[in-house]
Each structure stands twice: as C-alpha cells, then as structure tokens.
Image: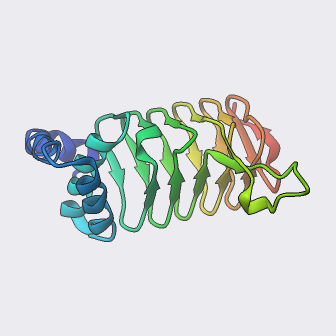
Amino acid sequence: MRVRGREKFQKHKRLISLLTRIFSLFSRSARVKLLIHYRDTKGVRGLAVRYALLRTLAKHVGDNVSVYPNVYLAKTYGLSIGDNVSIHPLCYLDADGGIEIGSDVSIARNVSIISFNHRYDDLTVPIKEQAIERKKITIEDNVWIGANATLLAGVTVRSGSIIGAASVVTHDVEENSIVAGNPAKVIKYRQ
C-alpha cells in the first residue's frame, strides 16, 4: 500500500520541525540563498528542505505543504499557505502584493501567481519606469488551479473552484465554479 503525503509528513514532522529551527538561526538572506540552492533538489530531501526553509521565510506555512522542484518563489514575506497544499514544478509565485493560499489547494505545473501590476497611465514615462501597483491575491480552500494558468493581482478565487488549464484569471472567481479561457469566464458550476 502506498503511503500518502499526509502520512509521510506526520511521520517526519518532528525532524522537519528541528530542521526549521536550525534554519531559523541563519540570516534571512542566507535562507533565501538556500531556498534558491535547493530549488531543483528532487525527492523527499528536496521537499523537506524547501518546506523547512519556507516556514522561516513566509508569513505562514501550514502542515503538509509540498513545493516541488523548480518552483520559483519571490517576495516570500508576503506569502501565506494553509494545510495540505501542493505547488507543482515550474510554478512562479511573486508575493510582493501578498498571496494567501487556503488549505487543500492543488496548483498544477507552470502556474503563475503575480500579485503586482505595472502602472502605465503616464504617457510621458516609459512603462517599465512607472510605479508598481501591489494587490493581494486570495485563493480560498479546496481549489484546483490547472496547468499553465495565470492569476493576476487583486483576484480572489473562492472555495471549491477550479481554474482551467491555460486560463488567465483577471477577476474574482465565484464559489464552486469552473472557469476557463483568456480572460477566464465561468463555464459551469460544481453541483
């Protein structure tokens, strides 16, 4: 019988807590460098080290959070993650404006979650030199985000929702809805 991630986490919880306490003795910049260093480490070792480091860098990280290899995490000080969350390879999360992820969330491969936008309203200033606008992204409990989806600054994805693969979420997503497309629109409701 195959052991699930939750059982593995419980089995090794004390060891992971010890590793977290050890990492917390390092400076923030050292922990960020270690997180980058272990970004592509595979297997249980990589999962455990990334989890322990993230617990020392983010606002909050719950139990049984799996950050798979090659996930890019920027501005982790604005990141909050609930329990039983999986973030699969090649995802990019930039929490400069704040990202709050609830519990029981699955984020598939190559998803981008970006909590800021470039301003572009001043025609006399190049866009890349204009101010940044930071807006929190909230992903409530029990959400599945399909591969290659993008969530943009300021959106809330309500509980029980599914974001279709390759969708671009520019507006809030209703509870128990399935959205898809660019921009993402409701295609049906879960019943």
Which residue is depicted at the point 57% across and 45% down? Answer: 144
Q: Nearer the viewer, residue 57 or 190?
A: 57
Which residue is depicted at the point 28% across and 36% down? Answer: 63
Q: How many numbered discs, if any?
A: 0
Q: At which x and y percent is residue 177?
A: 72, 36
Q: At which x and y percent is residue 13?
A: 14, 40
**Up-down: is 46 above or below 17?**
below
Q: How is the image coloured?
A: rainbow
Q: Looking at this view, name the residue that lies furthest to the front.
A: 124
Report if residue 83 is visible in the image.
yes
Q: Nearer the viewer, residue 191 or 182?
A: 182
Q: Is residue 140 left or right of residue 37?
A: right
Which residue is depicted at the point 73% across and 30% down? Answer: 174
**Up-down: is 104 above or below 35?**
above
Q: At which x and y percent is residue 120?
A: 83, 52
Q: Is residue 114 left or right of residue 86?
A: right
Report if residue 1 is visible in the image.
no
Q: Is residue 170 left or right of residue 77?
A: right
Locate the C terminus by quadrant.
Answer: top right
Locate the N terminus by quadrant.
Answer: bottom left
Which residue is depicted at the point 66% across and 55% down? Answer: 150
Q: Is residue 43 left or right of residue 91?
A: left
Q: Looking at this view, name the residue that lies furthest to the right.
A: 123
Q: At which x and y percent is residue 158?
A: 64, 30
